Image (cartoon, helix red, strand yellow):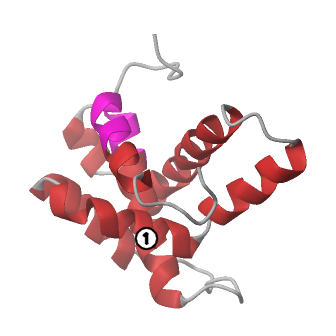
Amino acid sequence: MTLREETPMAIPDARMLNPLQLAYIGDTVWDLLIRSRIIYRRRSPRHMHKDAVACVNAHAQTEAMRRIEAVLTQEESDVYRRGRNAHTHHAAPKNQDVADYRAATGLEALVGFLYLTGQEERLLHLFKISQEENTDAQV
């Protein structure tokens, strides 16, 4: 059982997607993973929101990417790199560093790729590694 309504996408088909399309779905999947971890902490809604904001931002996602970089396959690294180098049609938010914003887009593209291709086990493994050193919000 999975949240996906459609069957997983073939890897060659997913490779053909624009990296910003991968990041589009990856952003939501990442948010769901973070919020799923937070809900088990049984905190007040206000604290849950603060924790989520602390973990779902460009800097936190860049740190998460730093933690998993060494264990990525060549294909995963390529997807990340394509996402990081994708040309968005808008600037990074005022409070975010451009390099962090680009790295976060790369992470989101990777998450989207793994999700769309049905590689949930791998996605969850990388997510767990990405959160091991996260002490900012205690997620």
Image mark count = 1
Q: Which residues are magenta?
A: 112-125
* In the image, farthest residue toward the top: 1
Q: Kindly give the residue lying farthest to the left in the view shown.
A: 74
Q: Residues within 10 Å of mark 1 (few under 14, many from 20)?
A: some
**Along the line of sight, which residue is nearer the eye, 18 or 52?**
52
Q: Is residue 118 visible?
A: no
Tell me, yes or no, if residue 80 can be seen here: yes
Note whether 80 is above or below 113 in the view shown. Answer: below
Which quarter of the figure has residue 57? bottom right
Q: Is residue 91 magenta?
A: no
Residue at x-position 31% and y-position 34%: 117
Amino acid beneath label 1: Glu
Main SS, magenta region, reads: helix
Q: Nearer the viewer, residue 47 or 110?
A: 47
Q: Residue at x 33, y 50 (%)?
A: 129
Q: How far from the left and from the top, in percent, is residue 85?
A: 35, 78
Q: Which residue is mark 1?
A: 63
Q: Is residue 69 above or below residue 45?
A: below
Q: Is residue 63 above or below residue 27?
A: below
Report whether 43 appears left or right of 58.
right
Which residue is at a point 78% across and 47% down the rendered structure image?
48
- Where residue 27 appears, x then y in whole percent? 56, 53
